[in-house]
C-alpha cells in the first residue's frame, strides 16, 4: 500500500518580488510541513506550476490542469498535478504605478484590475492523472461554490488516502464532500500504464515520425517535444516511454521544462524533454536535437544527426501493421464493395493495439537473447553479463547499425540487469519471448496473422490497465459553467495547518497498529525460449556439404601425413574457410585430434595447421560474432612442435596477428563464458557427491547455467549462514582461478615471438581499451598499482620491457574489470596484480628460446629467390627483399575475366637496381606455381609511393606493405614478408627515394651507368671528356656574361658587330675550321672571326639536326646566311649561338632576311622567356611558313593589334618595339610568294589563280573548309559566324569584336562539320589573311583587330599544364586502379571519362588539323601559346608530321623530336620531375600526350608511317626511364653546360651502353624489324587530316597492356636477348615429340612474341632455316627491300589493267590504304555505315587526307569515301561498249564482281560512281561478236563479244582477242558458279 498523495502545496504569485522583470511564484502553504522520511519534498515546484513564467493578467483565465514530472536524485519520479486558477491581486501597490497616469478622470475610470495565478499542487509517486484532476477540481469547486465542507477536511482526507500499487484491485475513495471515486490498480506494475496517450501521439505525428522518434530514443539521441498544451507534452513523453517497454529510459526525462531552465537543453547527454511552443525561437539554435512539434505534426531532424532505423524486414512489417490499426480503411480503399463496418477501434483500445505492435517488435528483436546471458555469480547476488557478439552473430545482424547501438545502450544494460536473473516474477514480455517465438516465425510476411496476434496482446494490455471494465460510476462535483468569471470571488483562504496535521497524525497512528500487508511476489524460473540457432542465415546454407567434406579430408590427410594430398586440397580449403560453416567444421575437426590437451606435430603438419588457423581467424571479425576465435583459443595452446631439446613451439606464437586478440570485449566474453561453465560444473558436481537433501533429486546433466542459477536462488533463503558463506567462497575462488588462467592465455597471444619487435602492439594500438569495453562498471581498484608492481617483480629486462609493460597494462586492465564485476575480493585482486608481471616475464623467457630455435629451422616451402636479369651497367643496390606481390584493381592478372588460375598474389622478392625496381617470383596458387611472374618499372618513372597494410590470404601474415605507382602505367602492391625487418623496409624506401630524386641530373642512371653504386650515392664524377667540359664552361660563362649585361643594365643592348667581336677576342687556336661550304670572297669567314672554342661549338651546331632540316626545307644554310640577301626570304641567324638572347632556343634560328639581329634582340623582350617567333617549317607547295613562339608579355600583345584610340604623343620604347614587332610580322608575310606576286592588298582568290591554275575540279573539292574547322576550334554557334567561342566547343560567346576571324569563318556558307574532318562541299573562295596567329584567348582579352593589318589573330582556349598533370593522374587511376571497386561511379569507363585525357588529345589534334588546313591553303601560321615549350611544341610537331611525309619516316621522326622538342627547349627534366629540385612540380607528361596523338593518327593512317606502334611505345617508355641521356635536361644550353650535347662518336668504350636512344633504335632496327611498319606504302606529298572527335579516338594500349611473363618489353635485350639463349637450349633436345598446341594467357604472355604476325613469322623461319644450313643470315631490311623490288617488277610485267596480286607492297590497293575498318558512305543521304572487320580496331570514321598536287592520285581513296565494291573485284579492265540506239561506242572501266554477281562499269578507273550495272542473273549467253557501226578501228575482229540478257543485247570490244577471251571465260565461270 502507498499514499495516493505525498504533499499538497498551495503556490501563489509573489507580490513582494513583482518589481523585477519576471514575476516569481512562492509556496504559500504546504502539507504536511515536515518531509516524509521515505520521500523528501521536491524542490522548485513553483517553477513547474507556471512553466512559461509567473505573470499578471488583465482578465481572469479559465482554470487549467496539467501534470509535471520531477525526477529526484535516486531516479524516482514524482508526479506534480497542478491545478491553476486566477485571483484578483489584493495589494494595490503594484496597481498605483499602472493607474497613476489616469489622474484626470479618476472619478469615472476604475483602476485596471489585475489577476494573479494561484496553483493547487498535489505531489505523488503514482501516476493517476484523472484522480488528481478530480480531487483538485473538487477542492476548487468547494472553494468557488462555497460548499459547506471545510477545505482542511478534504486535504486531510486526500493526504491520508492509501491505495495498493498493483495487483489488479480496485479501491473506492472519498474526500468527504459527498464525492466518490474508484481507483483501479494495474494487475502488473512492470507494464506501463498509458491511457490513450500512445494513440494520441500517433494521431498528432503520424506513423513514420513516431518510428523515427522511437529509434532515436533507443539509440540515445536528444528529443524535444513542442506544444502549446502542457498536458499534451506530458502525454507525448509518457507515450514514447510506453512504446519503449521492456526497455526503460535512463536519461534526463522532463515532460514539461520551465522557461527559466531552458539551458538544460544544451546538456551533452541524451534526453526527452517537453517545452512550451512559447519558447520555440530559443530552440532554433540547437544543432543536435530532434524537435517534434505536436501541434504542427512535424519532426525535424538536424543534418548532423543520422538515426539508425529498425532492420528490414521488421521496419516494413511494423509500418504495415501500424497502418492497419490506425487506418483500417486504407486496405479496402480501392475495393469496389468496401465492407460497411471498418471503423478503427476506440482510442483506448487503439492505444493498446499500438503498444502490442511494439511489444511484438521487441520480441522479434530480442528473441533468443537469454541464450546469450552469462551468469558469472549466483550467490550472494546473481551477476549476469550479455554476450553481444554471439547474439549478433547468431542473428546474422552484425552489420546492423540499429541493433548494435541498442545493445551498447544504457537502456539495454538496465534490461539485462533487471531481467537477466532466472528466478523472479515474470510478465507479458517474458511469456512472449518464451512461448510465442515460433508463432511469430510462422506469421512473418502475413500482416493479417500478425494483426490477430497483436489484437490478442492488446487485450492483455487492456486488461492489465482496466481489470474491472464495469466500474461503478464516479461522482465528483464540478463548478457551474463560467463560475471563474464571477466578479466578486473570495480569495482562496489560508488553511489551518493544525487541523490538517491532526488528520495526518491520526492516520499514521492507525497505520502503526495495522499489520503491514506484504505483497507476495510470485517468483518462478524464467523460461528462456527457443535457442537462436534456429535462426539460420542464408549464407550458412550456401556452404554445401561438399566444402565441409573437403575441409575434413584435408585435416585427415594432414594428420595421416599424406602431405601431397593435403597440399592439393589446401587452396580449396583456404577458399572454403571464408564460409562460417567451414570454419566451425574446422574447429570441431581439430578438436578431435587433441589428446590430453596436447597434440605434437611435425614441421610440415604444424605449418599446414597454422595456415588454416590463420585463414580461419583472418575472416573473423574483431568481435568474433560466431565464436570461432573462442573455439580456437584452446586449440592454439594445444597444437605444438618440438624445436629442440626441451623447446616446444605452440601454435599461438604463429597466429597472433589478428585484431580479435587485442579486443577487450572478446576476452571478457570468453572469460565470462568459461566462468559460467565452471560455476555450472561446481553445482552439478556438488549434487552428484550426494550432498543434496532428500527433498530434490539430483540435477540432470543437461540443465543450463541459468536453470541451475534459478534453482539455487530458490533454495538460497532456506540455507544456513555457514552453507551460504561456503557457496560464496567457492564461487569466488572459481572466478579467481579463471582470472589467473586468462592472464596466462592473454600473455600467450599478446607477446610476439620476437619480443624485440613491438609488432602487435604497434599495429593494433593496445592503448585504447577503455573505449571498447561493453560494460558500464569501470571502477578500477588497481589502476595505480600496476606500475609499481612491475618494478617490484624483480625482473629487469631492458629489451622487452616496452612490450612487457604494455601487455602487463592490458592484462591488468582486463583483470580489474572482470574481477570487480564478478566480485573477487580485494586480497585476491592484489595477488593477481603481483602475479601478472611475473607471468609475462616468464613467458618472455620461454619465447626467447623458441625464437632462437625457430630461426634455426629451415624455412618451409619458401620458394628460392629468383634473380632478375640485369642490363649492362645496371647494378643491384640492395639484396632482394622477400615480398608478396598483391593483385590490384586490374582483374586479368588474377585470372578474373578470362578465367584460369590467378597469377597474383605471387611470392618472390623485390630488387632495387640503379635503373629499375623489379619483382620476380612465382604465384602462390599451386596450379600455376611453376610460372615466373615479373613486374618492373624504371625508378625514374615512380610517381607515388604509399604505405599500405595488407592482409592477404597467404601462408604467413604480413606486417606492412607499399604501393608504388609508375608513370609507365605500372603498379606494384607489395607486402613485406615477416622475415624482412621493418628497418630494412625503411632502408629500402630511403634508397628508392634517393635514386628517384637525385640531387642533380648527373645522378640519374643515364649518367651513372657502369659506375659502382657507391659513387652514385655520393655523386662523385670524373668527367671523361675534359676539353669538352671546358668548352662548355666557356660557352656558358659567355652566355651568363651577356645575359647579365643585358638584364642588369636595362640599356638598349646592341650586340657588337662581327668585326668588333673578332678584334676583341684574341686568336688562341690557329686551326681554321671552315663552316661555310662555299666561301664567298666578299664575306668574312666564320673561322676568322670566332674564338676557337666558339668555332668548335659552331661546327657542332651546324652538325645539329635542325640545320640539316633547314637545308632540306630550303630555308637557307649557314654560309649563305652571311652573304646572300636578295634571293632568299629567310636566313639562319647566329644571334643566339651563345644562348644570350634566349636560353631555351637552339643556337641557330631561321628569321626573315630583312630583319637585322639588333631588332630581334629587342623583339624577344616582348615574348615570355624571350621566345620570339622563328620559322620552323615551310610548305614546299604553297611556300607558307609555320612559326613558333611563346605567348606575349602583357605589353607585347599591343603589337598584334593596333589600338585605334592609343595616344600618339611621342615614340616611346614600347611603341618602337611594337612597331618592330609589326615589321617582323610584315617581313614574314612579304616572304610569301602569294604576297609578293600579287599587287597591293591581295586576296586568296588571286593567290589561287596564280598558283593553282593547274588544279582540276577534284582539287577544289579537296580544299578543306577551314571556316568550319575554325568554328569548331573556336566553338562558335552557326548563327553568329563572326564571334569566337572557346576551343571546348561549348558555344559560349566571348568578348572579341566580331571582325576577328571573319575572314575565316564568315563567308563559309556550308554547314559545319559532322565528324571532325573536311566536308565534301565545294571550297568557297574567300579573302584570307596571309598570317594567322594562334594565340591564347585569356591573353588577348579586350584587344581589337585592325582591319588594315595583313595578319589575323585566332584566339583559342588552351588547357593549362596543370590540367595535363591532374588528367594524367586520373588516367593512371583508371588504367591501373589500386583495388577493385564495386562503386558504379568508379568503373573503368567512368574514370576514363572523368580523367579528360581523350578530351585533351582531341583539343590538340583539333588545333593541329586547323593549322594544317591553313598552311595547305597558303596562309602562314604562327603558334604563340603559353611559354612556347609545351602545347606550342605539341601543335607545331603534329602539324609538321601531318603536312610533311618525311617526318613520318624513322629518320624524319627522330629529326622532328630532336628539332622541336630537344633543341627548342621542352623542359623534359622539369616536366618529368627528374631531380630533387623538380620533385615538387610533379610529373606532367606533355611529350607522352604528343606520342598519344601520333598513335591516334597512326591508327587512322596505318600505311603512312614507316615506324610501328611499338616504336611509339618504346619512346613513351624510355622518355621517362632515364636509361638514355636523350630526354634529360631542359634545353640545348643545359646539355652543353653539362657536356652531353656533342659526345664524340668513337668515345664509347662499352659497346653495350648507349647514351642516345636514337643510336639504340638504329642498332636494334638493323637487327630486327620490331620498329618497322610492314604496311608502310606512302603517297608522295600526302597531307593527313585525321578525325579528332573523342568517338574517333582510342585508348592507347600502352596504358593497359601488361606482360607478367617478362615485364615491360622495352628493354629489348632483357626480354628478347634471353629468349634467344632459351631457344638455343631448346634446340639441343629435339628427340622428344613437341605439341603444336599453344596456350596464350592474356596479361601473362607477350602476345606479339608468342603469336607473331605473318611477315615476322616468315622472317623468323627464314632465319632459323639459314642457321640450320649454316649460312650467314642476311639483314632483314635487305631481304625486305629485295622482295619489294621483285614484286614491283612483277607487277609492271603483268597486264596494265589487271589487278596487282601484291599482298602489301603495292600502293594502288585502296582498301589497304584505309584504316582497318570498312567504310560505306552514300553521298546523297550522308549516312555512314561502319562494318567492322576487326573487332579490336574498327575505326569509326575513315580519316581523310589532303592532296599533294593537282593531278589525280590513288590517295584520294583516303579522302573520298568509296563504296566497298573494291573489296569484291574478281576481274577488271577497259572495254568499249556500244551505247543504246544511235549512241557511239565508248571506253568504260568494267569490273566483274563474283561476290555481288554483277558486272559494273565506270567512266574511268579512278571513278567512284558506278555508271551502270549488269546483273549476271539476267544474262542468258556470252558469245563471240562482230564489229558494228562506229566500232573502234584497227582492232582484231575476235576482240568483239556480245552479252545477251533477258532485257537487252550488249556489244563489247576488248583491246585484243586474248583479252576478249579472258573476259568471256571469266563471265562464263561466274555464270556456271552461280
Image (cartoon, rainbow, N blue to C red):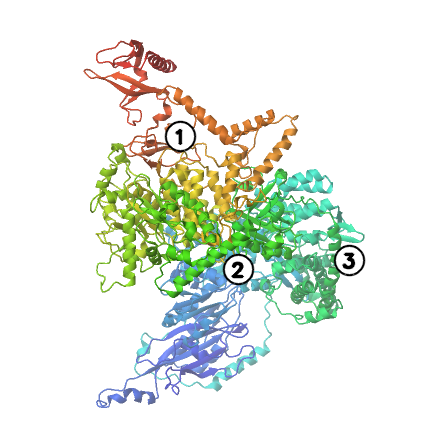
For residue 90, above or below residue 1449: below
* Quarter that holds the N terminus: bottom right
| Side (left or right) of 1493 relative to 881 | left
Secondary structure beneath disc 1? helix
Secondary structure beneath disc 2? helix
**Total numbered labels placed on residues in the image:** 3
Q: Residues within 10 Å of mark 2 (few under 14, many from 20)?
A: some
Residue carrying label 1: 1712
Residue 1591 image-quadrant placement: top left
First in sequence: mark 2 or mark 1? 2
Q: Nearer the viewer, mark 1 or mark 3?
A: 1
Residue 474 visible from this viewpoint: no
Task: State the mark number for residue 405.
Answer: 2
Residue 801 location (% of width, % of height) = 70, 65
Q: Are marks 3 and 2 in contact (CB under 8 Å)?
A: no
Q: Nearer the viewer, residue 317 or 829?
A: 829
Q: Nearer the viewer, residue 678 or 925?
A: 925
For residue 108, above or below residue 1313: below
Residue 415 location (% of width, % of height) = 56, 62
| Side (left or right) of 96 relative to 134 | left
Amino acid at each position: 500500500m502507498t499514499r495516493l498523495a505525498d504533499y499538497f502545496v498551495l503556490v501563489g504569485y509573489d507580490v513582494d518580488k513583482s518589481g523585477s522583470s519576471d514575476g516569481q511564484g512562492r509556496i504559500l502553504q504546504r502539507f504536511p510541513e515536515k518531509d516524509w522520511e521515505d520521500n523528501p519534498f521536491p524542490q522548485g515546484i513553483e517553477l513547474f506550476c507556471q512553466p512559461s513564467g509567473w505573470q499578471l493578467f488583465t482578465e481572469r483565465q479559465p482554470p487549467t490542469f496539467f501534470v509535471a514530472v520531477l525526477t529526484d536524485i535516486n531516479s524516482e519520479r514524482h508526479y506534480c498535478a497542478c491545478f491553476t486558477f486566477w485571483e484578483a491581486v489584493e495589494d494595490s501597490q503594484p496597481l498605483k504605478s499602472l493607474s497613476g497616469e489616469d489622474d484626470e478622470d479618476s472619478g469615472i475610470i476604475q483602476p485596471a484590475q489585475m489577476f494573479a495565478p494561484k496553483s493547487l499542487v498535489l505531489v505523488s509517486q503514482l501516476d493517476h492523472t484523472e484522480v488528481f484532476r478530480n480531487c483538485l477540481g473538487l477542492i476548487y469547486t468547494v472553494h468557488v461554490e462555497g460548499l459547506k465542507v471545510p477545505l482542511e477536511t478534504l486535504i486531510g482526507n486526500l493526504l491520508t488516502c492509501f491505495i495498493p500499487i498493483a495487483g489488479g484491485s480496485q479501491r473506492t475513495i472519498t474526500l468527504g464532500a459527498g464525492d466518490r471515486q474508484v481507483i483501479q490498480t494495474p494487475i502488473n506494475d512492470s507494464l506501463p500504464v498509458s491511457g490513450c496517450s500512445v494513440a494520441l501521439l500517433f494521431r498528432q505525428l503520424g506513423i513514420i515520425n513516431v518510428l523515427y522518434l522511437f529509434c532515436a530514443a533507443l539509440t540515445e539521441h536528444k528529443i524535444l517535444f513542442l506544444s502549446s498544451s502542457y498536458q499534451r507534452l506530458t502525454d507525448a513523453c509518457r507515450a514514447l516511454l510506453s512504446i519503449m517497454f521492456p526497455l526503460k529510459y535512463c536519461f534526463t526525462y522532463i515532460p514539461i521544462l520551465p522557461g527559466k531552465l531552458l539551458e538544460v537543453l544544451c546538456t551533452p547527454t541524451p534526453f526527452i524533454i517537453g517545452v512550451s511552443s512559447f519558447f520555440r525561437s530559443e530552440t532554433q539554435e540547437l544543432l543536435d536535437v530532434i524537435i517534434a512539434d505536436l501541434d504542427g505534426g512535424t519532426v525535424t531532424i538536424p543534418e548532423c544527426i543520422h538515426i539508425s532505423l529498425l532492420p528490414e524486414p521488421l521496419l516494413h512489417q511494423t509500418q504495415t501493421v501500424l497502418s492497419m490499426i490506425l487506418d483500417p480503411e486504407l486496405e479496402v480503399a480501392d475495393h469496389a464493395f468496401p465492407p460497411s463496418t471498418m471503423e478503427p477501434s476506440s482510442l483506448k483500445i487503439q492505444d493498446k493495439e499500438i503498444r502490442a505492435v511494439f511489444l511484438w517488435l521487441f520480441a522479434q528483436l530480442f528473441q533468443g537473447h537469454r541464450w546469450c546471458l552469462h551468469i558469472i555469480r549466483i550467490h550472494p547476488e546473481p551477476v549476469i553479463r550479455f554476450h553481444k557478439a554471439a547474439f549478433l552473430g547468431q542473428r546474422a545482424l552484425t552489420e546492423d547499425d540499429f541493433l548494435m547501438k541498442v545493445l551498447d545502450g544504457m537502456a539495454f544494460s538496465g534490461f539485462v540487469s533487471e531481467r537477466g536473473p532466472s528466478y523472479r516474477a515474470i510478465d507479458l514480455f517474458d511469456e512472449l519471448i518464451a512461448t510465442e517465438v515460433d508463432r511469430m516465425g510462422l506469421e512473418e510476411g502475413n500482416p493479417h496473422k500478425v494483426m490477430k496476434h497483436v489484437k490478442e496482446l492488446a487485450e492483455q494490455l487492456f486488461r492489465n490497465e482496466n481489470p474491472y471494465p464495469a466500474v461503478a460510476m464516479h461522482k465528483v462535483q464540478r463548478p457551474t459553467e463560467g463560475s471563474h468569471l464571477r466578479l466578486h470571488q473570495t480569495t482562496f483562504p489560508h488553511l489551518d495547518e493544525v487541523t490538517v496535521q491532526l488528520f495526518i497524525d491520526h492516520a499514521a497512528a492507525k497505520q502503526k497498529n495495522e499489520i503491514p500487508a506484504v505483497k507476495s511476489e510470485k517468483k518462478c524460473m524464467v523460461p528462456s525460449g527457443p535457442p537462436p540457432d534456429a535462426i539460420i542465415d542464408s549464407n550458412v546454407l550456401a556452404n554445401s556439404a561438399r566444402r565441409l567434406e573437403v575441409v575434413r579430408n584435408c585435416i585427415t590427410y594432414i594428420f595421416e601425413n599424406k602431405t601431397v594430398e593435403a597440399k592439393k586440397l589446401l587452396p580449396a580449403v583456404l577458399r572454403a574457410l571464408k564460409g562460417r560453416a567451414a570454419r566451425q567444421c574446422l574447429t570441431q575437426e581439430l578438436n578431435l585430434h587433441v589428446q590430453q590437451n596436447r597434440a605434437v606435430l611435425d614441421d610440415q603438419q604444424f605449418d599446414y595447421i597454422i595456415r588454416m588457423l590463420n585463414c580461419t581467424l583472418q575472416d573473423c571479425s574483431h568481435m568474433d560474432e560466431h565464436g570461432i576465435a573462442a573455439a580456437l583459443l584452446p586449440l592454439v595452446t594445444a597444437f605444438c612442435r618440438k624445436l629442440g631439446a626441451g623447446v616446444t613451439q605452440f601454435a599461438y606464437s604463429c597466429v597472433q596477428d589478428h585484431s580479435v586478440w587485442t579486443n577487450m570485449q572478446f576476452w571478457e566474453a570468453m572469460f565470462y563464458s568459461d566462468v559460467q561453465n565452471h560455476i555450472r560444473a561446481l553445482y552439478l558436481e556438488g549434487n552428484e557427491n550426494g550432498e543434496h537433501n532428500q527433498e530434490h533429486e539430483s540435477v540432470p546433466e543437461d540443465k543450463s547455467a541459468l536453470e541451475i542459477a534459478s534453482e539455487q536462488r530458490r533454495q538460497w533463503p532456506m540455507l544456513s549462514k555457514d552453507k551460504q558463506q561456503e557457496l560464496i567462497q567457492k564461487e569466488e575462488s572459481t572466478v579467481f582461478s579463471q582470472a589467473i588462467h586468462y592472464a596466462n592465455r592473454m600473455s600467450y597471444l599478446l607477446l610476439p615471438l620476437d619480443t624485440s619487435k613491438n609488432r602487435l602492439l604497434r599495429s593494433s594500438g593496445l592503448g585504447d581499451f577503455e573505449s571498447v569495453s561493453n560494460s558500464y562498471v569501470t571502477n578500477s581498484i588497481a589502476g595505480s598499482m600496476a606500475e609499481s608492481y612491475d618494478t617490484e617483480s624483480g625482473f629487469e629486462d631492458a629489451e622487452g620491457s616496452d612490450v612487457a609493460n604494455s601487455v602487463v597494462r592490458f592484462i591488468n586492465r582486463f583483470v580489474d574489470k572482470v574481477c570487480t564485476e564478478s566480485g573477487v575480493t580485494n586480497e585476491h585482486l592484489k595477488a593477481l596484480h603481483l602475479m601478472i608481471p611475473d607471468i609475462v616475464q616468464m613467458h618472455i623467457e620461454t619465447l626467447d628460446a623458441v625464437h632462437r630455435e625457430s630461426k634455426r629451422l629451415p624455412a618451409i616451402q619458401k620458394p628460392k629467390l629468383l634473380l632478375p636479369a640485369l642490363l649492362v651497367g645496371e647494378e643491384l643496390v640492395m639484396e632482394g627483399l622477400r615480398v608478396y606481390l598483391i593483385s590490384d584493381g586490374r582483374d586479368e592478372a588474377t585470372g578474373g575475366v578470362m578465367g584460369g588460375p590467378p597469377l597474383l598474389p605471387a611470392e618472390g622478392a623485390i630488387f632495387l637496381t640503379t635503373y629499375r625496381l623489379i619483382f620476380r617470383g612465382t604465384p602462390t596458387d599451386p596450379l600455376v606455381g611453376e610460372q615466373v611472374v615479373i613486374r618492373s618499372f624504371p625508378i625514374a618513372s615512380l610517381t607515388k609511393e604509399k604505405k599500405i597494410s595488407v592482409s592477404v590470404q597467404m601462408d604467413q601474415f604480413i606486417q606492412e606493405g607499399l604501393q608504388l605507382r609508375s608513370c609507365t602505367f605500372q603498379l606494384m602492391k607489395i607486402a613485406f614478408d615477416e622475415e624482412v625487418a621493418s628497418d630494412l623496409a625503411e632502408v629500402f624506401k630511403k634508397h628508392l627515394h634517393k635514386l628517384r630524386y637525385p640531387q642533380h641530373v648527373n645522378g640519374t642512371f643515364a649518367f651513372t651507368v657502369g659506375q659502382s653504386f657507391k659513387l652514385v650515392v655520393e655523386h662523385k664524377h670524373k668527367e671523361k671528356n675534359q676539353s669538352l667540359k671546358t668548352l662548355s664552361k666557356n660557352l656558358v660563362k659567355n652566355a651568363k656574361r651577356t645575359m647579365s649585361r643585358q638584364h642588369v643594365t636595362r640599356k638598349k643592348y646592341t650586340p657588337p658587330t662581327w668585326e668588333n667581336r673578332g678584334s676583341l677576342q684574341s686568336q688562341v687556336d690557329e686551326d681554321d675550321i671552315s663552316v661555310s661550304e662555299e666561301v664567298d670572297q666578299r664575306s668574312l669567314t666564320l673561322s676568322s672571326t670566332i674564338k676557337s672554342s666558339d668555332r668548335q661549338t659552331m661546327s657542332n651546331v651546324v652538325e645539329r639536326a635542325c640545320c640539316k632540316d633547314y637545308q632540306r626545307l630550303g630555308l637557307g644554310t649557314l654560309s649563305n646566311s652571311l652573304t646572300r640577301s636578295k634571293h632568299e626570304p629567310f636566313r639562319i641567324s647566329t644571334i643566339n649561338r651563345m644562348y644570350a638572347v634566349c636560353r631555351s632556343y637552339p643556337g641557330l634560328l631561321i628569321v626573315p632576311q630583312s630583319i637585322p639581329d639588333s631588332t630581334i634582340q629587342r623583339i624577344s623582350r616582348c615574348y615570355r622567356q624571350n621566345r620570339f617567333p622563328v620559322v620552323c617549317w615551310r610548305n614546299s607547295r604553297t611556300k607558307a611558313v609555320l612559326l613558333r613562339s611563346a605567348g606575349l608579355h602583357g605589353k607585347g600583345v599591343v603589337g598584334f593589334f593596333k589600338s585605334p584610340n592609343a595616344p600618339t604623343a611621342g615614340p616611346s620604347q614600347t611603341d618602337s618595339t611594337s612597331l618592330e614587332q609589326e615589321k617582323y610580322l610584315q617581313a614574314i608575310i612579304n616572304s610569301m610568294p602569294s604576297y609578293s606576286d600579287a599587287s597591293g592588298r591581295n586576296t586568296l582568290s588571286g593567290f589561287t589563280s596564280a598558283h593553282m591554275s593547274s588544279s582540276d575540279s577534284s582539287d577544289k573539292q579537296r580544299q578543306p573548309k577551314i571556316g568550319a574547322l575554325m568554328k569548331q576550334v573556336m566553338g562558335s554557334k552557326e548563327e553568329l559566324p563572326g564571334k569566337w567561342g572557346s576551343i571546348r566547343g561549348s558555344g559560349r560567346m566571348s568578348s572579341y569584336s566580331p571582325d576577328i576571324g571573319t575572314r575565316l569563318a564568315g563567308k563559309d556558307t556550308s554547314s559545319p562539320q559532322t565528324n571532325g574532318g573536311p566536308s565534301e562541299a565545294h571550297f568557297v573562295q574567300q579573302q584570307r589573311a596571309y598570317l594567322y596567329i594562334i594565340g591564347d584567348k585569356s591573353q588577348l582579352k579586350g584587344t581589337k583587330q585592325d582591319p588594315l593589318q595583313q595578319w589575323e589573330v585566332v584566339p583559342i582556349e588552351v588547357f593549362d599544364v596543370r590540367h595535363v598533370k591532374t588528367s594524367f593522374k586520373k588516367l593512371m587511376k583508371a588504367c591501373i586502379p589500386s583495388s577493385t571497386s564495386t562503386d558504379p561511379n568508379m568503373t573503368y569507363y567512368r574514370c576514363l571519362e572523368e580523367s579528360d585525357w581523350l578530351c585533351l588529345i582531341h583539343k590538340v589534334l583539333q588545333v593541329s588539323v586547323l593549322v594544317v588546313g591553313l598552311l595547305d591553303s597558303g596562309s602562314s601560321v604562327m603558334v604563340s601559346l603559353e611559354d612556347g615549350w609545351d602545347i606550342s611544341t605539341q601543335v607545331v610537331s603534329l602539324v609538321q608530321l601531318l603536312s610533311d611525309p618525311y617526318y613520318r619516316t624513322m629518320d624524319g621522326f627522330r629529326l622532328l623530336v630532336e628539332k622541336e622538342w630537344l633543341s627548342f627547349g621542352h623542359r623534359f627534366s622539369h616536366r618529368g620531375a627528374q631531380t630533387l629540385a623538380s620533385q615538387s612540380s610533379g610529373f606532367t607528361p606533355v611529350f607522352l600526350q604528343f606520342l598519344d596523338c601520333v598513335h591516334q593518327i597512326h591508327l587512322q593512317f596505318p600505311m603512312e608511317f614507316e615506324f610501328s606502334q611499338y616504336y611509339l611505345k618504346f619512346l613513351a617508355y624510355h622518355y621517362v626511364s632515364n636509361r638514355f641521356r636523350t630526354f634529360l635536361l631542359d634545353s640545348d644550353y643545359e646539355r652543353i653546360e653539362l657536356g652531353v650535347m656533342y659526345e664524340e662518336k668513337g668515345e664509347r668504350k662499352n659497346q653495350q651502353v648507349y647514351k642516345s636512344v636514337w643510336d639504340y633504335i638504329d642498332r636494334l632496327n638493323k637487327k630486327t624489324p620490331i620498329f618497322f611498319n610492314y604496311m608502310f606504302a606512302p603517297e608522295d606529298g600526302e597531307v593527313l587530316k585525321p578525325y579528332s572527335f573523342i568517338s574517333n579516338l582510342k585508348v592507347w594500349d600502352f596504358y593497359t597492356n601488361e606482360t607478367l611473363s617478362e615485364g615491360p618489353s622495352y628493354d629489348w635485350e632483357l626480354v628478347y636477348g634471353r629468349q634467344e639463349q632459351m631457344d638455343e637450349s631448346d634446340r639441343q633436345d629435339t628427340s622428344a615429340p613437341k605439341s603444336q598446341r599453344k596456350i596464350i594467357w592474356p596479361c601473362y604472355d607477350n602476345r606479339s612474341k608468342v603469336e607473331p604476325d605473318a611477315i615476322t613469322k616468315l622472317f623468323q623461319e627464314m632465319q632459323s632455316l639459314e642457321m640450320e644450313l649454316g649460312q650467314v643470315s642476311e639483314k632483314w631490311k635487305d631481304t625486305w627491300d629485295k622482295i619489294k623490288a621483285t614484286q614491283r617488277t612483277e607487277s609492271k610485267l603483268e597486264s596494265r589493267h589487271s589487278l596487282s596480286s601484291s599482298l602489301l607492297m603495292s600502293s594502288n590497293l585502296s582498301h589497304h590504304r584505309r584504316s582497318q575498318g570498312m567504310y560505306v558512305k552514300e553521298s546523297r543521304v550522308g549516312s555512314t555505315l561502319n562494318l567492322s572487320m576487326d573487332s579490336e580496331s574498327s575505326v569509326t570514321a575513315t580519316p581523310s587526307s589532303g592532296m599533294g598536287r593537282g593531278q589525280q592520285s590513288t590517295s584520294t581513296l583516303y579522302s573520298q569515301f568509296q563504296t566497298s565494291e573494291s573489296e569484291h573485284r574478281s576481274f577488271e579492265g577497259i572495254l568499249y561498249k556500244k551505247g543504246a540506239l544511235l549512241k557511239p561506242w565508248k571506253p568504260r572501266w568494267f569490273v566483274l564482281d563474283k561476290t555481288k554477281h554483277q558486272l559494273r562499269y565506270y567512266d574511268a578507273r579512278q571513278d567512284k560512281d558506278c555508271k551502270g550495272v549488269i546483273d549476271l542473273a539476267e544474262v542468258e549467253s556470252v558469245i563471240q561478236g562482230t564489229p558494228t557501226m562506229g566500232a573502234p578501228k584497227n582492232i582484231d575482229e575476235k576482240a568483239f563479244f556480245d552479252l545477251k540478257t533477258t532485257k537487252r543485247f550488249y556489244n563489247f570490244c576488248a583491246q585484243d582477242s586474248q583479252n576478249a577471251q579472258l573476259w568471256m571465260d571469266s563471265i562464263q565461270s561466274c555464270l556456271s558458279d552461280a
